[in-house]
Amino acid sequence: MSKIAKWLKKEQENSILTQVKNLKTENPLDTWELFEEIGDGNFGTVYKARLVAQPSVVCATKKIPLCEDEEEDIYTTELLVLSECKHQNVIKLLDCYLHVDNIFLMLEFCALGAMDSILKELDRGLDEEAIKIVTKQTLEGLRYLHKNGIIHRDIKAGNLLLTDQAIVKIADFGVSARNKNHSKKRVSHVGTPYWMAPEVIVCETVKDNPYDYKADIWSLGITILELAEMNPPGHDLHPARVLLKIPKSPPPTFLYPGKWTEQFTDFLSRCLTKDTKRRYSADQLLKHKWIASCRDNKALRMVIGEVSAPVEEKLEEQGQG
Amino acid sequence: MSKIAKWLKKEQENSILTQVKNLKTENPLDTWELFEEIGDGNFGTVYKARLVAQPSVVCATKKIPLCEDEEEDIYTTELLVLSECKHQNVIKLLDCYLHVDNIFLMLEFCALGAMDSILKELDRGLDEEAIKIVTKQTLEGLRYLHKNGIIHRDIKAGNLLLTDQAIVKIADFGVSARNKNHSKKRVSHVGTPYWMAPEVIVCETVKDNPYDYKADIWSLGITILELAEMNPPGHDLHPARVLLKIPKSPPPTFLYPGKWTEQFTDFLSRCLTKDTKRRYSADQLLKHKWIASCRDNKALRMVIGEVSAPVEEKLEEQGQG
């Protein structure tokens, strides 16, 4: 193959459509029946769906209207990342359709929904053992993603889904970044720094730094505080104020330090370290004593028992009808 | 046209090849004769070339070998930006070929070469009037680029070319960025900031800021110091040291302040303002008294008279041969 042919081929491969494996163009409603709206995301509606041929098989269907606005790269990113990922703690893409004016993502169904809605239903934060289980599973998902050069960039309780088997799945990859060799690439762009504006240097330094995946670890730390206290620190402040405050302030800590073990407090501080170099990686955190002491899912199963699973009930109702 | 058709079309349009207007695939050497190597850039060799049919028409030919390394987006960026730009102070792309294993960019020929080599040849900095002319023309180019959503990102004397007609042309768009609606797009990606790592906030704040084109203005300020003093500030330090120093230090100023007028010193300080909001735009700088007092190109023509134009001489020699 000539170099031109290779180059042209590479160009084609850059087309998002051809990068998504098994993108189907038939009508998904021939195969799946959407029977209940379960959410309204940023980029479309989420339905619960079941296989027409085998109604016991359910999925969550994200229906995204194709439009020509600029948000397009958000769902195409999600499509690409999901079509590449296979890990127990990362939401699985079962099927994917491009039909008429919509993209349909058929995603693993997580009966309990997102962790933030579980907190709302409980009307309290989780206990330390339950947080530990959620944290451990999230870290295993993150370790997988980071090893594969994917930064999630939006880790929070609202993006951690829970199955009725007490499995936590990282979802919502709309703002994720693939950063394989990203930093290497960047460096070569920068050239000599003498002419560079100070604000560019600050930003390039952040982008060039091989620790950019550590942003997910910080977000995990904030998510831990959210799981413990129902809200992230600063939730009572205006977002713009928070943007100014976080870089200037020391890392947040527990509101009631006495409530939590020393190991847990230490673990949290490894996530919420401002120096990205010193901030632990997913790998390091999984070896931390607090996580290593996690033996089973019992505490999380108890949480599941406590919250009702309304979708499940509805299914039964429908079965009766 | 259905939405899918539109989407597919958009995908195709994203292919760089189709975005470059008039990309030719025939052999450029049928039309142009490369007769002299005049430089060796980061991404290929630069030749002086002349039209076979009309040898008095010359151009600078950038021959870029196609390879599968990661630098590819650098020359494709240049190709795209140049194929869109039409301004007296921006280097013009006359023709562009994709042939066998190479891309050939046929660029406007600037007989005097880059401003940094002129400084070397003079073995001194320019006087204030000559700097004023270079600055004014560069600003006119920058105003055009910024209005069209293009940030050059590598403004320095080495990327300002000079014609024998004393016209300054901005060249080398390899690291440029198109940022039309870029910031608007970004903001929607960020979402609520509570979970964001401090280093991400710092960087996003830079990227989101509608003043990112002001980076070119800072670089212009440094270029002014370079034109005046032959080198950018900090040139004697290691690049890594400079990266650390610039964001922390006050803006650089002239080494010999007494040598320059008050208006010039004030103008420079408007370029080298750390707060991007307060840093002047190209438009504002063109209205500054120091620039507004620029009437003709005489001082720059005198510089041209002073430096020899070796390429011109060679041409004559060849004409004689």
Image (cartoon, coloured by chain):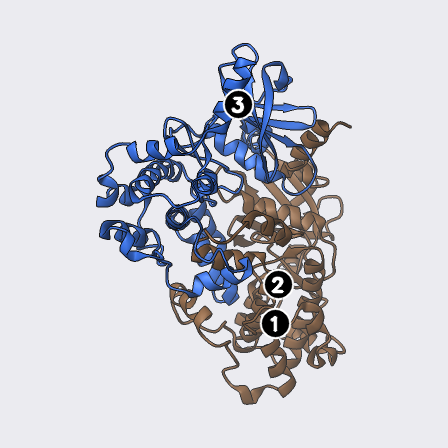
Chain colours: A brown, B blue
Q: Which mark is residue A211?
A: 2
Point 54% across, 37% down: residue: B77
Q: Which mark is residue A133?
A: none
Question: Which secondary structure, mark 2?
Answer: loop
Image depth: mark 3 or mark 2 in front: 3
| B32, B100: nearer the viewer | B32
Alpha-carbon span between mark 3 and mark 1:
61 Å
Q: Chain of mark 2?
A: A
Q: Are marks 3 and 1 on the same chain?
A: no
Q: Which amino acid type is marked by label 3?
A: Lys
Q: Residues within 10 Å of mark 3 (few under 14, many from 20)?
A: few
Give how far across and how far down residue B104 sits, in percent: 60, 26
Q: Quadrant of the N terminus of chain A?
A: top right
| B250, A63: nearer the viewer | B250
* Residue hosting label 1: A279
Q: Is residue A245 above or below residue B212?
A: below
Q: Which amino acid type is marked by label 1?
A: Arg
For the residues labelled 1 and 2, say whether their Cβ atoms are less than 8 Å apart.
Answer: yes
Q: Which amino acid type is marked by label 2?
A: Tyr
Question: Which secondary structure, mark 1?
Answer: loop
Q: Which mark is residue B314?
A: 3
Q: Is residue A123 above or below residue B295?
A: below
